[in-house]
Amino acid sequence: MTAILYPLAANAEQALLRPLGRAGRMSDARRRAGVDVVFTTDAVGPAFATRTAALDAYAGRVDDERTGSTPDPEERFCRLIEQVAEGTPRARSVEPTFVDGQRWPTPPRPPQTVWRLSISYWRIATAERPLEAPQARQARKSKQELTPETLQAIARTPLRPVKPQQPLDIGLFEIRPPEAPHIVMPDE
């Protein structure tokens, strides 16, 4: 099985154009960099109005269903993502209208979207740090206004628990044998 060899760099642009090295595992990336690394995914490069234009610009870097071409298995660290274009007004909530037998008003037209290249790479931990995302539940319960950048950072980070998970209880009719306390057995 061939693993994806992710680039090692200080930022996404460097990872795409001139990485410091390539590594499939965190331990390999840490060894090559000599410092701690963090796995991250960032959008890089210009925005394209259509997927076709983005596929033409990044030919060979992403899967192209038009031609059937795919990058080598080790090179699959790039993909195209669709994002809402900058400057697009935010959607606002609407109230039911109950006019002419219709409950809701006509929906607004969908926001304009663009296509960007998303790259996954090992970022050197001492390099510039993107916005650190708060824990999602605490951010939602707090009374402060969340900026779009904070929401994007929360969406990009894996779920983090509010508190450490407690050890699991064993049932009423289960025991741990003294010779193997790591095993839970049913007791009849």
Image (cartoon, helix red, strand yellow):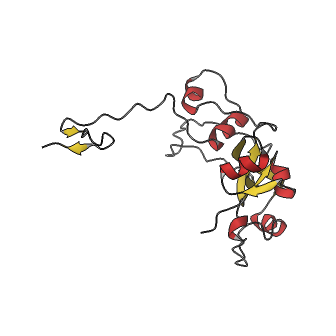
* Residue 184 in the image: above or below residue 60: above
Q: State the image coordinates of residue 57 (x, y, percent, origin top left).
A: 84, 66
Q: Examine the rendering and report whether any part of residue 41 can be seen.
A: no
**Residue at image location 68% in from the left, 69% down from the top:** 73
Question: In the orientation shown, which residue stands out farthest toward the left?
Answer: 188
Q: Examine the rendering and report whether any part of residue 70 can be seen.
A: yes
* Residue 34 in the image: above or below residue 119: above
**Residue at image location 24% in from the left, 40% down from the top:** 177
Q: State the image coordinates of residue 56 (x, y, percent, origin top left).
A: 82, 69
Question: In the orientation shown, which residue stands out farthest toward the top?
Answer: 143
Residue 60 falls left or right of residue 100: right
Q: State the image coordinates of residue 33 (x, y, percent, origin top left).
A: 78, 47
Q: Nearer the viewer, residue 29 or 38?
A: 29
Q: Nearer the viewer, residue 81 or 17?
A: 17
Indicate the quadrant containing the C terminus: top left, top right, bottom left or bottom right: top left
Q: Nearer the viewer, residue 24 or 94?
A: 24
**Residue at image location 68% in from the left, 38% down from the top:** 153
* Residue 74 in the image: above or below residue 155: below
Q: State the image coordinates of residue 29 (x, y, percent, origin top left).
A: 72, 50
Count of numbered badges drawn on the protein: 0
Residue 183 falls left or right of residue 81: left
Indicate the quadrant containing the N terminus: top left, top right, bottom left or bottom right: bottom right
Q: Quadrant of residue 35?
A: top right
**Residue at image location 71% in from the left, 39% down from the top:** 90
Q: Quadrant of residue 125?
A: top right
Q: Quadrant of residue 185?
A: top left
* Residue 57 in the image: above or below residue 116: below
Question: In the orientation shown, which residue stands out farthest toward the front?
Answer: 179
